[in-house]
Amino acid sequence: QVELVESGGGLVQAGGSLRLSCAASGRTFVSDAMGWFRQGPGKEREFVAAVSRYGSTHYRDSVKGRFTISRDNAKNTVYLQMNSLKPDDTAVYYCAAASQIGTTPQTMAVMPKYWGQGTQVTVIS
């Protein structure tokens, strides 16, 4: 079993920044892809960003240029630096780690994965 623990959420004004962290523990493995999803009020969960173990990345269009995903394989940790935050970014952010070998950042949204418990990000105008 793999456990994912997120941290770093909170309340921020529009234009501000937050950095989310997610540490994976449990079964010893290095997931091919790790990433972040979010679910806003009254919305479905959506893909935000993902990163491969080699550092290649993939983002949803609405966060390109504002969010940066990175990972530290030695620590089995993935980060999401969020800048220029907007009220539309308000959501519960979930960390995910691909559970199937060969998952890429581009396919992560549709492949099996482990989930964290989520961390709330609220952006006020």
Image: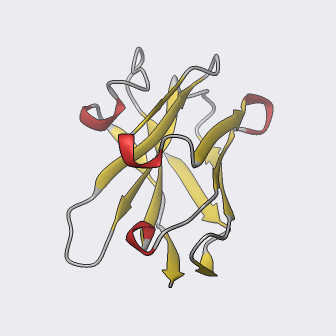
Q: Is residue 28 left or right of residue 88?
A: right
Query: Tell me, what colour scheme is on the image?
Result: secondary structure
Measured from the top left, where is residue 80 in percent x and y? 62, 50
Q: Taking 41 as reference, is 57 above or below it?
A: above
Which of the two residues, 70 or 53, is positioned nearer the viewer here? 70
Which of the two residues, 23 or 1, is positioned nearer the viewer here? 23
Q: Is residue 36 left or right of residue 70?
A: left
Badge count? 0
Which of the two residues, 9 or 33, is positioned nearer the viewer here? 9
Point 57% across, 20% down: residue: 56
Outermost residue on the right side: it is: 74
Point 55% across, 30% down: residue: 51
Point 56% across, 54% down: residue: 4
Measured from the top left, where is residue 109 in percent x and y? 30, 37
Q: Quadrant of residue 74?
A: top right
Point 46% across, 48% down: residue: 63
Q: Is residue 53 left or right of residue 119?
A: right
Q: Is residue 5 left or right of residue 64?
A: right
Q: Taking 8 as reference, is 102 above or below it?
A: above
Measured from the top left, where is residue 108 in percent x and y? 35, 31
Measured from the top left, where is residue 9 in percent x and y? 61, 72
